[in-house]
Image (cartoon, grey):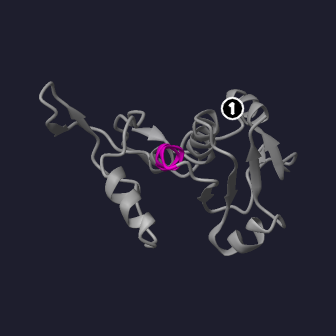
């Protein structure tokens, strides 16, 4: 049991770094045929391959942000958009000196992440996912809440994270 970013206590299990999206070919096919695909949501079961290529489940949980960033990178997506509970990511969250972030670079995101500005059970996994996506060649990432996605896409709000 661990304290969860000021939201109480929760049981934790391992969350391995995703290496592959098993359904990627099916997802690509659906996208190419004009479908909107909802994929890699949280709560999936991590699997490993044995020597013969068979899959078996392992104890843990798939982090939806890390899985989404891997899928976006493998699909060469132009944008990784992470929809969350806040309009913008910020430094010193919920403190008197809180500072919203508008546009930052990959290097700045890494620096702020390493300095602990993003809580492990909250914004931390989202920023880590964006760092991974940009390091794999992604072009741009955006963090905002669902009701501001339209405005954020037009540059009016949200936190944009860009390659260096």
Q: Which range is magenta? A: 68-75
**Residue under the point 70% across and 49% down:** 140
Taking the image as shown, residue 21 lies to the left or right of residue 157, namely left
Q: Which residue is mark 1?
A: 116
Numbered marks: total: 1
Instruction: Answer with the quarter of the image where residue 2 lies.
Output: top left
Give the percent coordinates (x, y) of residue 53.
16, 33
Taking the image as shown, residue 45 lies to the left or right of residue 149, namely left
Taking the image as shown, residue 138 lies to the left or right of residue 27, namely right
Instruction: Decide whether residue 154 is among the magenta residues.
Output: no
Q: Which residue is most to the front?
A: 32
Give the percent coordinates (x, y) of residue 55.
17, 39
Give the percent coordinates (x, y) of residue 27.
38, 59
- Quadrant (top left/top right/bottom left/bottom right) for the N terminus: top left
- Prevailing SS of the magenta stretch: helix
Q: Nearer the viewer, residue 18 or 113?
A: 18
Instruction: Decide whether residue 74 is among the magenta residues.
Output: yes
Q: Is residue 86 above or below residue 106?
A: below
Taking the image as shown, residue 132 lies to the left or right of residue 161, namely left
Q: Nearer the viewer, residue 19 or 108?
A: 19
Give the percent coordinates (x, y) of residue 144.
69, 61
Q: Nearer the viewer, residue 17 or 100?
A: 17
- Quadrant (top left/top right/bottom left/bottom right) for the C terminus: top right
Q: Secondary structure at mark 1?
A: loop
How many residues crowd around disc 1 within 10 Å: few (fewer than 14), some, or many (20 or more)? few
**Residue under the point 55% across and 48% down:** 76
**Residue under the point 48% across and 43% down:** 70
Instruction: Answer with the quarter of the image where residue 86 lies.
Output: bottom right
Instruction: Answer with the quarter of the image where residue 62 lies.
Output: top left
């Amino acid at each position: 049991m661990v304290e969860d970013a000021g939201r109480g206590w929760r049981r934790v299990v391992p969350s391995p770094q995703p290496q592959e999206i098993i359904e990627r070919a099916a997802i690509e096919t659906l996208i190419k045929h004009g479908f909107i695909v909802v994929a890699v949501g949280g709560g999936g079961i991590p699997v490993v391959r044995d020597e013969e290529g068979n899959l078996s489940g392992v104890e843990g949980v798939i982090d939806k942000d890390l899985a989404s960033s891997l899928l976006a990178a493998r699909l060469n997506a132009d944008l990784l958009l992470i929809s969350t509970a806040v309009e913008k990511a910020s430094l010193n969250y919920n403190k008197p000196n809180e500072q919203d972030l508008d546009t930052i670079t990959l290097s700045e995101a890494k620096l702020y992440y390493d300095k602990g500005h993003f809580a492990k059970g909250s914004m931390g996994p989202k920023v880590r996912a964006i760092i991974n996506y940009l390091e794999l060649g992604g072009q741009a990432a955006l963090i905002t809440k669902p009701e501001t996605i339209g405005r954020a896409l037009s540059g009016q709000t949200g936190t944009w994270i860009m390659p260096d």
